Image: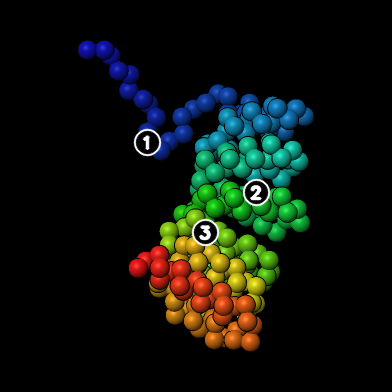
Amino acid sequence: MPFIKRSSTAPGEEKPDDSLATHIGALMSPDPEARWSAARALGGRAVAVDALAAALGAEQIPRVREAIMTALIRVGDQASVLALLPYLRSQDAGHRGTAIEALQALPKAIMPFMPALLSDGDTDVRILATELARNMPGKDATRVLCDLLKSEQHPNVCAAAIDVLAEVGTRDAVPALQACAARFADTPFLPFAVSTTIARISDGEG
């Protein structure tokens, strides 16, 4: 029988890696290729999240930014979410878009942050937050978006939520959708969107 060496690392424990400090240091290298390689090497390393977050804040090369965000996605914890959330407020549309894509890839980790995002004082943040529900299980997306619809006063935010519900919502969304349509009866596009969404939900589950 071949001898199998038992690992000395407990489950869930980071395996010691002498190159970790080297990769973290390379995130600030003047060479974009070195930064890109470092980000790829640090993917999934929870201990590197702070360094990855700092690097993301300084990085201007799209390819390297993408590698850093991918590394954060591979970690996939709430610390990774916290590193990505500030970019929802970025003035750069590209940064906002890549942050949305990254956060959509972490539906479980983003869930605890959804109530605050969907009640944010910035209308644009609330609209972007509805997109984060698109990759959630239908039941979860329906719950958070219906909670939004019950109190949201901006028609564009409601429209964004309705659009996502049309794709992933369940029949549990129907009462909130109907109430929203009634509340915005004088905004023609919303009742129409609601009726279309209810029809899609009914067809999809029927």
The residue under the point 58% across, 48% down is 102
Residue type at mark 2: give it.
Answer: Thr
Provide the residue designation for mark 2. Answer: 98
* Callout 3 crowding tier (Cα within 10 Å): few <14, some 14–19, many ≥20: many
Provide the residue designation for mark 3. Answer: 134
Label 3 residue SS: loop
The residue under the point 52% across, 26% down is 17
Q: Distance between the residues labelled 2 and 1?
A: 32 Å
**Residue 197 picture location, percent across and down:** 50, 71
Provide the residue designation for mark 1. Answer: 11
Which of label 2 and label 1 is nearer to you?
A: 2
Q: Distance between the residues labelled 3 and 1?
A: 32 Å
**Residue 121 picture location, percent across and down:** 67, 71
**As drawn, 46 above or below 136:** above
**As drawn, 86 above or below 68:** below
Residue type at mark 3: give it.
Answer: Arg
Along the polypeptide, which appears first: circle 2 or circle 1? 1
The residue under the point 49% across, 81% down is 178
Q: Does residue 7 appear in this view?
A: yes
Residue type at mark 1: give it.
Answer: Pro
